[in-house]
Amino acid sequence: MAFPQHIRLVEVGPRDGLQNEPDPIATSTKLELIDRLGAAGIRYIEAASFVSPKWVPQMADHREVMQNLARRDGVVYAALTPNLKGLEAALECGVEEVAVFGAASEAFSQKNINCSVAESLERFAPVLERAKQANVRVRGYVSCVLGCPYEGEIAPAKVAEVSKALYEMGCYEVSLGDTIGTGTPLAAKRMLEAVARDIPMGKLAAHFHDTYGQALANLYAVLEEGIAVVDSSVAGLGGCPYAKGASGNVASEDVVYLLNGLGIETGIDLEALAATGTWITQTIKRPNRSKVGVALAAK
């Protein structure tokens, strides 16, 4: 068994977590959260989502967030840009890196972005081309890789097909998302095996939600296979609005605690990260879903 020596943690809390809140969060709170995460040693932060304010009013301040960041050296501040309009707005704000998101489930794609999987990929083509012209890297997401609220189990071959399409379009990295958190370790390994036939392991990332309490187990399983990039959300913020009962992404604090125990380097200050999780959940009046964060706060 050979784990990676170093893991890059991608913090999606400011985007994935806060956009699912029922009420908009103050811009100043978002900016402070991002700054605290950077101070704790997080080196990749998805800071905003350039989606339509009509559909996601919680992210209506994406320009204000990106333009008022207290940028730290060595930290990438990325943004989600689902279409060309969103990308152009992000470029105007000086974004360094962007992300697009597809799905391995036809039904989920229709419910989430109102088009088929094939149509979603077609929409990304001009986004990738424009980003390339602007010398901005693009990260790809694939949702529902281990299950869909409408279709149930998803075939690994379908995940591989969508992932390969994103990679061949120019995404430098593809993040594999268990959006509704129903996956288990063996299923995660089988899915990853299928995807890795077409894409180098070093170009893949794990994005596991913790609805059924399997996120850390699934993460351990794919670490064994060589995954070295992990998406997480401080305090386990977030969830999937299209899946009843789906909880947030795996908590960043819990991931760092696991990695520390495995002797894997992250460069992250766990105490500072946990304090950030405590602060943000108290500020937005939400439960802290990080077991490590809760335990450290009780000391």
Image: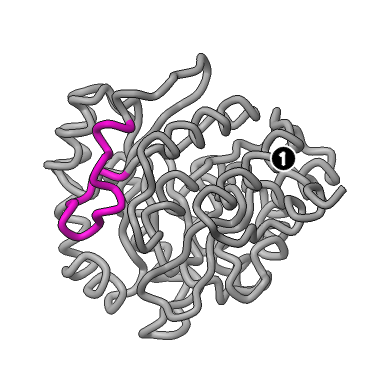
Task: Write the residue at 15% across / 63% down.
Answer: 119
Does residue 235 lie above or below 158 as drawn? above
Task: Write the residue at 22% across / 39% down.
Answer: 128
Q: Which residues are magenta?
A: 49-65
Task: Write the residue at 47% across / 82% down.
Answer: 153
Residue underneath mark 1: 4
Residue 268, horizontal then vertical, whole percent? 69, 32
> Does the segment drawn in magenta span residue 106?
no
Compared across the picture, whether 200 is left or right of 254 comes to: left
Residue neighbourhood size for the residue with mark 1, other residues' Cα within 10 Å, grouped as few (<14), some (14–19), many (≥20):
some
Any part of residue 135 in sight: yes
Task: Write the residue at 20% across / 65% down.
Answer: 118
Does residue 82 lie above or below 29 as drawn? below
Compared across the picture, whether 41 is left or right of 259 comes to: left
Q: Which quadrant of the structure image shows residue 139?
A: top left
> Does the segment drawn in magenta span residue 59?
yes
Compared across the picture, whether 57 is left or right of 160 comes to: left
Secondary structure of the residue carrying numbered label 1: loop
Residue 121, horizontal then vertical, whole percent? 21, 56
> How does the figure colour the protein chain or chains?
one colour
Looking at numbered disc 1 in the image, what kind of residue is underneath it?
Pro
